[in-house]
């Protein structure tokens, strides 16, 4: 049984999220503040974290930052903040997805399942993808650039893999969203930019002058051809 850590300070909302996730077959641990979230994460080692941003004691940004220093566990941000900048900051800190309040509990469950599927991955031949010095091992879910191992979040891994399967092909943001989430949620396509920025920071020798992930202005992104 997969374990989900829910971090939400509003008791009624926390109860609703817990009820829907448990009904969907998950084991749920629910806490209401930032310090308790870190304690529960370290004690329980959940498979996924649903993380509110507005928390007492320690906000969700700091919680996300602390967790990412220790783990690549999938994180889904749950927030009432509708400003794009807040959402992008969360993604740049390493969150895998976000959903804004008010939300449908059924959509939340669907998004949790989608993020977990990305984390687990679906293996299909070839088992290793290569583009220059970039090597993606699909079975081990490992990425290397030359002799250096690169640690990616599940969403970053799926995004890179989607482009590496078709080097040279130009993908729009909506197409990339559909490939990594199974659906292209309207209004979410700009979050791809945050994930691309993170990927470039991790795999590019010089992120300001990328060699692997190239921008096609006015369209989207592509992975360079061999």
Image (cartoon, helix red, strand yellow):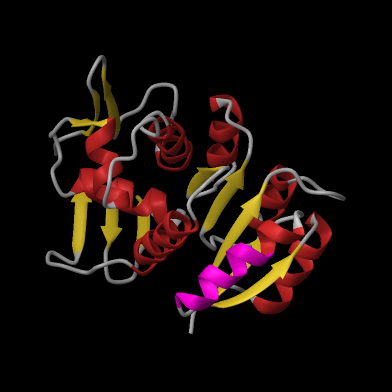
Q: 73 above or below 217?
A: below
218 to the left or right of 70: left
84 to the left or right of 216: right
**Picture quadrant where residue 204 is located:** top left
Depth check, front residue: 17 or 188: 17
Q: 16 above or below 225?
A: below
The answer to whether any part of residue 208 appears in the image is yes
Give x and y (percent) for residue 183: 27, 47
Depth check, front residue: 196 or 188: 188
Give x and y (percent) for residue 118: 35, 61
**Picture quadrant where residue 142 is located:** bottom left
Which residue corresponds to the image point at 30% horizontal and 30% vertical from the top-left?
Answer: 211
Depth check, front residue: 146 or 204: 204
Q: 58 above or below 223?
A: below
Which residue corresponds to the image point at 30% horizontal and 50% vertical from the top-left?
Answer: 180
| Magenta highlight range | 15-24
Which residue corresponds to the image point at 57% horizontal and 48% vertical from the top-left?
Answer: 77
């Amino acid at each position: 049984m997969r374990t989900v850590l829910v971090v939400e300070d509003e008791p009624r909302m926390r109860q609703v999220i817990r009820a829907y996730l448990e009904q969907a077959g998950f084991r749920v641990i629910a806490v209401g503040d930032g310090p308790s979230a870190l304690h529960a994460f370290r004690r329980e080692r959940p498979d996924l974290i649903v993380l509110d941003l507005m928390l007492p004691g320690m906000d969700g940004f700091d919680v996300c930052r602390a967790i990412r220093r220790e783990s690549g566990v999938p994180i889904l941000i749950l927030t009432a903040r509708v400003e794009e900048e807040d959402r992008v900051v969360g993604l740049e800190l390493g969150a895998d997805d976000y959903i804004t309040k008010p939300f449908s509990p059924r959509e939340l469950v669907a998004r949790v399942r989608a993020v977990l599927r990305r984390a687990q991955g679906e293996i299909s031949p070839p088992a290793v993808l290569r583009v220059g010095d970039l090597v993606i091992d699909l079975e081990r879910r490992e990425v290397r650039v030359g002799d250096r191992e690169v640690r990616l979040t599940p969403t970053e891994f799926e995004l890179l893999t989607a482009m590496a399967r078709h080097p040279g092909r130009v993908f729009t943001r909506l197409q990339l969203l559909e490939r990594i989430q199974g659906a292209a949620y309207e209004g979410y396509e700009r979050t791809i930019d945050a994930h691309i920025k993170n990927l470039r920071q991790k795999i590019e020798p010089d992120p300001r002058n990328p060699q692997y992930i190239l921008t096609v202005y006015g369209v989207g992104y592509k992975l360079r051809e061999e």
